[in-house]
């Protein structure tokens, strides 16, 4: 699996449910940035990029959406549809979000502040970078 699903402990009683998110506890990094996506129009795809260094945790607070993930070799589609789990997205992982329900609210937690230089927005550049990294790793092992 290209990304890890993290189950959150839900505290429930007769009033409803509550989940606390804490960095270095159930969020496996220090949280530097929080943002959310909502009111996404029908048939719109979001993302379409990778990050050189950024880690993220995606949580679908309401509704549902799907993620297309690839590392340049393996491709996976994962649906998020519960606020009780998050999808841990490591760096150097190409992602696209799609098939948003009309009520979808997608929360993203990041381990770094926004930095445009961290984005890889062209898929062919992404593949080239990944292949270069793998070539470098191979040459170190020889």
Image (cartoon, grey):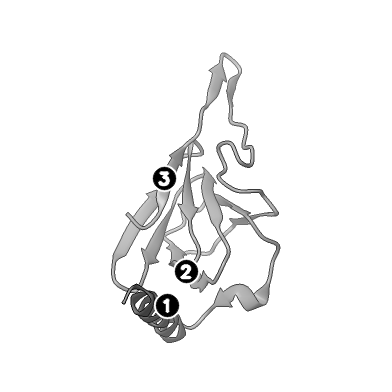
For this view, does 102 lie left or right of residue 112?
left
Q: Look at the picture and state if 123 lies above or below 79.
A: below
Mark-to-mark CA distance, 1 and 2:
10 Å
Classify mark 3: helix, strand or loop: strand
Q: Residue at x 38, y 76 (%)?
A: 140
Q: Nearer the viewer, residue 137 or 117?
A: 137
Q: Residue at x 58, y 75 (%)?
A: 119
Q: Nearer the viewer, residue 132 or 10?
A: 132
User: Sequence-wise, which precedes: disc 3 or disc 2?
Assistant: 3
View extreme (left): residue: 74
Q: Residues within 10 Å of mark 1 (few under 14, many from 20)?
A: few
Place of residue 122 in the rendered image (x, y in percent of width and height, measured from the top left)? 48, 83
Give the numbered dot on residue 5. Answer: 3
Q: Look at the picture and state if 136 lies above or below 61.
A: below
Give the numbered dot on residue 133. Answer: 1
Q: Nearer the viewer, residue 37 or 39?
A: 37
Mark-to-mark CA distance, 3 and 2:
17 Å
* Foreground label between 1 and 3: 1
Q: Residues within 10 Å of mark 3 (few under 14, many from 20)?
A: some
Mark-to-mark CA distance, 1 and 3:
26 Å
User: Sequence-wise, which precedes: disc 1 or disc 2?
Assistant: 2
Q: Picture quarter containing residue 66?
A: bottom left
Q: Residue at x 64, y 42 (%)?
A: 23
Q: Look at the picture and state if 40 lies above or below 19.
A: below
Residues at circles 1 and 2 in contact by the CB criterion of under 8 Å = yes
Residue 97 shows in the view: yes
Q: Nearer the viewer, residue 139 or 21?
A: 139
Give the numbered dot on residue 92. Answer: 2
* Foreground label between 1 and 2: 1
Q: Look at the picture and state if 83 lies above or below 15.
A: below
């Amino acid at each position: 699996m290209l990304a890890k699903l993290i189950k959150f402990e839900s505290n429930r009683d007769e009033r409803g449910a509550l989940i606390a998110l804490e960095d270095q506890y159930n969020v496996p990094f220090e949280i530097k940035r929080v943002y959310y996506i909502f009111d996404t129009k029908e048939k719109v795809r979001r993302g379409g990029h990778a990050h050189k260094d950024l880690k993220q945790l995606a949580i679908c607070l309401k509704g549902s959406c799907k993620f297309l993930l690839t590392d340049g070799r393996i491709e996976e589609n994962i649906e998020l549809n519960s606020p009780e789990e998050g999808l841990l997205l490591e760096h150097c992982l190409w992602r696209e979000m799609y098939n948003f329900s009309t009520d979808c609210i997608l929360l993203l937690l990041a381990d770094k502040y926004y930095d445009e230089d961290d984005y890889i927005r062209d898929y062919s550049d992404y593949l080239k970078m990944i292949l270069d990294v793998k070539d470098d790793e191979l040459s170190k092992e020889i």
